[in-house]
Amino acid sequence: MALAIFMGQGWSALDGKGRFALPAAFRNPLQLQCSNPSSILVRAIHGRQYLTIFGDLQAPEFLKKLEDQENDDEETVLADFWSGMQAVTIDSGGRFALPAFHAQHAGITDSIFIVGAGNQIQLWDLDALHAASPNNPIVRAALDVALKERDAKRRGA
């Protein structure tokens, strides 16, 4: 499998049908990680304020990293890994709905900030990412623009 690399960032507001949209630059690399169009996985990770999205073909790579780490309770590690994931479908326009428990875990309501993170995509609540003070100046600048646009949309401007 060719390794897909996700670079850049973007943001999306929730549409009238309860969906977010991935930036176009992320769509083709994501499909390269998938065995079929509906095999995109969203994952909540304990202790992290964001969600990750990746293709099902990447799951064994992430699982191997977990298995290579020393742990006292392999069954719990595996249950945590698999139970935090759910399949989502992304349509040809890049639109997808987040599972309710995943959105709740990450504090996501009406908008998301999307970060290319190498072999996966991070989905953040805009305010949570702002509070985390990202180090990358490009991400900070893009986040500031997204926050202004989101706030204007909320005011109906």
Image (spheres, rainbow, N blue to C red):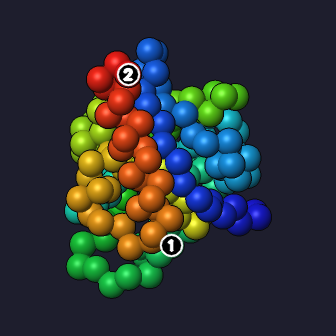
Residue 114 showing in the rendered view = yes
Q: Which mark is residue 64?
A: 1
Find numbered disc 1 in the image and state the secondary structure of the residue it sits on.
Answer: helix
- Extreme residue toward the bottom, this view: 70
Q: Position of residue 33 (x, y in %)?
A: 67, 53
Name the residue rendered at 23%, 79% in the picture. Answer: 72
Give the class, few, some or many, for how many residues have Cα within 10 Å of label 2's Cα (few <14, many ≥20).
few
Q: Residue at x 66, y 64 (%)?
A: 5
**Of the numbered discs in the image, which one, if any, rests on residue 157?**
2
Vertical relation: 68 (above or below) 12:
below
In the picture provided, is 37 more to the left or to the right than 80? right
Tell me residue 18's x, y (percent): 42, 21
The front one of 91 and 69 is 91
Q: Amino acid at mark 2?
A: Ala
Q: Amino acid at mark 1?
A: Lys
Total numbered labels placed on residues in the image: 2
Q: Is residue 122 visible?
A: no
Look at discs 2 and 1 and give the one toward the viewer.
2
Q: Quadrant of the C terminus?
A: top left
